[in-house]
Image (tube, rainbow, N blue to C red):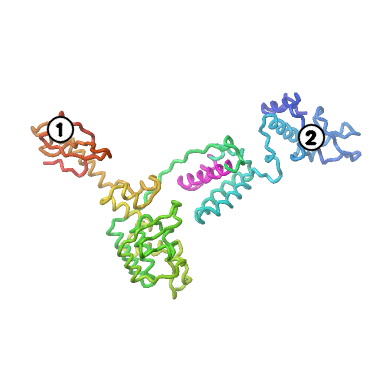
């Protein structure tokens, strides 16, 4: 019999409640029959078992069933298990946490069942590549959790799952975001409450740097692509040229462009469904408008612009370029030139963005790349070793100049410019920097610390 002397603390608390008269609904049955008379076994809660009415010493030993009301039916392998299940249901009902869905045969709160339903919805909302990633993450979770009740998945289970994966930290962070979106969806659908949404571990990662090339090398590669592919179709060269020019467009976005989305009258390319989920309008340069008007044949509005022409083996005429086609020709051109380790993305979009720092501010470049977040954009603004070296050298010269003023006023270095005065002018807060010469002293000015870069402090 289940008593408070031979069970653990949580079970003891539950049993004490119903033994005292809290919620005595529910019964335990057995499909087993008395081996002597064939009669049914009847539950005797006080004796702690199911016994035959005629042969009171014979008790059921298997095929136990717990019923609670008309809705809940649970099977148990032993009487102790059946008694524990019933005690748990009664305790949940007493606490106000009883949820009928936890005991239904079709397991409506099973992780696998709900994951499949969530993926069905996501397939209608996201692009195929994004959906495949989500499906991969959820399938990995299903392999571990299967039909675990979603209310029983907490921080520890999620952390163990993520750290058991065999891919990069960035992919683990993506999987975490996928699971977070899934549980948020459950809350919105009122499958679980706010309290039942688990906490999620913080996944730290650093985006990897892409290998880049200087603009001269980039131009050589693009020219080589033109040489080896132009006779096949000029659009391979044009696509790679555009990736290096219009740095807001990704390769996958570019090859999906349709004829109607290139407006020659306005000189615009329209990307209707980019990663940022907001249509991008990219202005074309005059030379590219001229190329489109003179070299590239146009097609019907709904045809893909980057499509295969007739007369080529292994491809279907009019079919959109495959995702890896541009990467293949870029790699072939790099091989011909003896250039290694530079992929299409790094050699076009990234290389151009980094080179533009010499001519434009980071804010201007970010507008050109059309990045919505700073984290991804920061990869374009990595500081090169030569730039850092120049900064260090300027600081070294500054320290040497301070130590050896050569009988000059302490506020000067050999008559050269040493300090910068920073003022705020106008309501807009525009900053202007005035160069100070040797005739001006510290006592006359407010100074603010600055970085000296490419300033010759020598004699």
Q: Residue at x 43, y 72 (%)?
A: 309
Mark toward the start of the polypeptide (2 vs 1): 2
In the rendered image, residue 396, in percent from the top left (x then y), is placed at 20, 38
Query: Closest to the observer: 318 or 392?
Result: 318
- Residue 228 highlighted magenta (yes or no): no
In the rendered image, residue 137, in percent from the top left (x then y), is placed at 54, 48
User: Quadrant location of the C terminus?
Assistant: top left
Which labelled disc corresponds to residue 403?
1
Helix, strand or loop at label 1? It is helix
- In the displayed structure, 103 sits above or below 47; it is below
Compared across the picture, whether 321 is left or right of 194 comes to left
Which labelled disc corresponds to residue 222?
none
- In the displayed structure, 20 sits above or below 49; it is above
Helix, strand or loop at label 2? It is strand
Query: Separation of disc 2 and disc 1 at Cα?
Result: 93 Å
Q: Main secondary structure of the magenta part?
A: helix
Residue lying at the far front of the rendered structure: 427
* Span highlighted in magenta in the image: 159-187
Residue under label 2, please give it: 27
In the rendered image, residue 73, in percent from the top left (x then y), is placed at 75, 40
- Residue 185 highlighted magenta (yes or no): yes
Residue 202 visible in image = yes
User: Quadrant location of the N terminus?
Assistant: top right
Query: Closest to the observer: 354 or 299?
Result: 299
Query: Closest to the observer: 256 or 452?
Result: 256
In the rendered image, residue 13, in percent from the top left (x then y), is placed at 69, 26
């Amino acid at each position: 019999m289940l008593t408070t002397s031979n069970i653990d603390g949580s079970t003891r608390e539950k049993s004490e409640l119903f033994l005292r008269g809290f919620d005595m609904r529910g019964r335990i049955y057995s499909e087993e029959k008395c081996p002597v008379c064939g009669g049914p076994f009847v539950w005797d809660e006080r004796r702690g078992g199911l016994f035959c009415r005629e042969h009171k010493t014979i008790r059921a030993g298997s095929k136990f069933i717990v019923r609670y009301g008309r809705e809940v039916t649970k099977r148990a392998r032993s009487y102790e298990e059946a008694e524990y299940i019933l005690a748990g249901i009664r305790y949940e009902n007493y606490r106000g946490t009883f949820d009928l869905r936890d005991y239904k045969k079709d397991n409506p709160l099973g992780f696998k069942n709900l994951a499949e339903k969530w993926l069905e919805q996501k397939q209608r909302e996201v692009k195929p590549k994004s959906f495949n990633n989500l499906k991969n993450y959820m399938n990995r979770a299903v392999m571990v959790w299967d039909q675990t009740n979603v209310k029983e998945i907490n921080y520890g289970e999620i952390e163990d799952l993520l750290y058991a994966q065999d891919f990069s930290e960035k992919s683990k962070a993506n999987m975490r975001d996928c699971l977070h979106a899934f549980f948020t969806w459950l809350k919105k659908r009122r499958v679980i409450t706010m309290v039942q949404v688990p906490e999620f571990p913080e996944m730290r990662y650093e985006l990897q740097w892409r290998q880049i090339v200087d603009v001269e090398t980039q131009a050589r590669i693009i020219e080589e692509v033109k040489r080896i592919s132009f006779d096949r179709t000029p659009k391979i060269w044009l696509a790679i040229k555009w990736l290096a020019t219009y740095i807001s467009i990704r390769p996958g976005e570019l090859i999906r462009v349709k004829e109607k989305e290139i407006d020659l009258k306005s000189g615009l390319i329209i990307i209707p469904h980019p990663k940022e989920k907001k249509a991008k309008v990219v202005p074309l340069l005059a030379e590219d408008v001229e190329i489109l008007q003179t070299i590239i044949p146009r097609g019907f509005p709904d045809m893909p612009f980057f499509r295969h022409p007739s007369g080529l083996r292994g491809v279907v005429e009019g079919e959109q370029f495959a995702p890896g086609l541009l990467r293949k020709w870029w790699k072939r051109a790099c091989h011909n030139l003896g250039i290694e380790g530079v992929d299409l993305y790094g050699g076009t979009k990234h290389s151009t963005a980094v080179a533009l720092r010499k001519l434009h501010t980071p804010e201007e470049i970010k507008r050109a790349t059309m990045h919505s977040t700073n984290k991804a954009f920061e990869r374009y603004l990595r500081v090169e070793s030569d730039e850092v070296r120049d900064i260090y050298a300027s600081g070294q010269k500054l320290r040497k100049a301070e130590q050896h003023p050569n009988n000059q006023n302490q506020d000067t270095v050999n008559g050269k410019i040493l300090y910068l005065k920073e003022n705020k002018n106008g309501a807009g807060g525009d900053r202007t920097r005035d160069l100070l010469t040797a005739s001006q002293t510290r006592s006359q000015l407010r100074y603010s610390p600055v970085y000296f870069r490419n300033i010759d402090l020598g004699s």
